[in-house]
Image (spheres, helix red, strand yellow):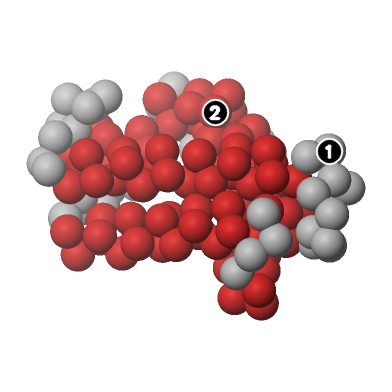
Amino acid sequence: MNISRLGTLTASVLLTDAAAHLYWLTGRTWPAHDVRSLSLAVLNFEVPFTPRVLVPLVVVLGTGAVAVLARSRGRGGLPARLVTAAVAAGTLVRAAAGLVWIAGVGADTATPFYWLNLFLYTPLCVVMATSAALVASRRGSRRL
């Protein structure tokens, strides 16, 4: 498998997520009608979509994307490897939580969150965790 492609895939998802958070930073709530609906669909609980909440997320997602991309191309050294491993660990934890919610613990099957988690969030986190772990464990070659 081509490690640089895995890095590009992972970084692209992280940057897309960062872009969504930047968009929400403008006060817009698409694809939801209001902040409450957006919060419930994305997180399954209410949180404010304020700069204090969103800016750190954008920074973390952007940093993760840069590190994963650098690591997948043999650059960035130990810091890139550690941040990429953190991306793998974080998305693995989110995937595990998603499996709990899919099992019906803490998520109502009648909510948009349940179905988004089932078909989008958790599968994407499984792919991301695997991809980032492979990139973090990269040796000198671009292929595993």
Can residue 97 be seen? no
Q: Earlier in the sequence, mark 1 or mark 2?
A: 1
Please name the residue shown 84% across and 54% down the image: 141
Which of the 4 quarters of the picture holds residue 102? top right
Q: In this view, does 115 lie above or below 23?
A: above
Secondary structure of the residue carrying numbered label 1: loop
Graded by Cα atoms within 10 Å as few (under 14), some (14 to 19) or many (20 or more), the crowding at tag 1 reads few
Q: Is residue 110 above or below residue 100?
A: above
Q: Residue furthest bottom?
A: 78
Name above or below for residue 48 compared with residue 29.
below
Task: Give 75 or 121, whichever is nearer the viewer.
Answer: 75
Q: Nearer the viewer, residue 129 or 117?
A: 129
Of labels 1 and 2, the one closer to you: 1
Q: In which quarter of the image is residue 10?
A: top right
- The residue under label 1 is 1
Specify whether residue 5 is in view: yes
Q: Is mark 2 on a helix, strand or loop?
A: helix
Percent x, y of residue 39? 29, 41
> Could you classify mark 2 by the number of other residues whose Cα lies within 10 Å: few (under 14), some (14-19), or many (20 or more)?
few
- Picture coordinates of residue 116, whole percent (x, y): 48, 27
Q: Residue 41 appears at what percent x and percent y?
A: 36, 33
* In the foreground, 130 or 92: 130
Q: Residue 97 carries which label?
A: none
Q: Which amino acid does label 1 sit on?
A: Met
- 81 displayed left or right of 112: right
Q: Mark 2 points at which residue?
A: 120
Residue ranking furthest to the left: 27
Q: Left of 31 or right of it: where is 2?
A: right
- Residue 78 image position (x, y, % from top left): 66, 77
Instruction: Give the residue displayed 75% in from the left and 46% down from the top.
Output: 3
What is the C-alpha distance between the residues marked 1 and 2?
23 Å
Is mark 1 in CB contact (under 8 Å) with mark 2? no
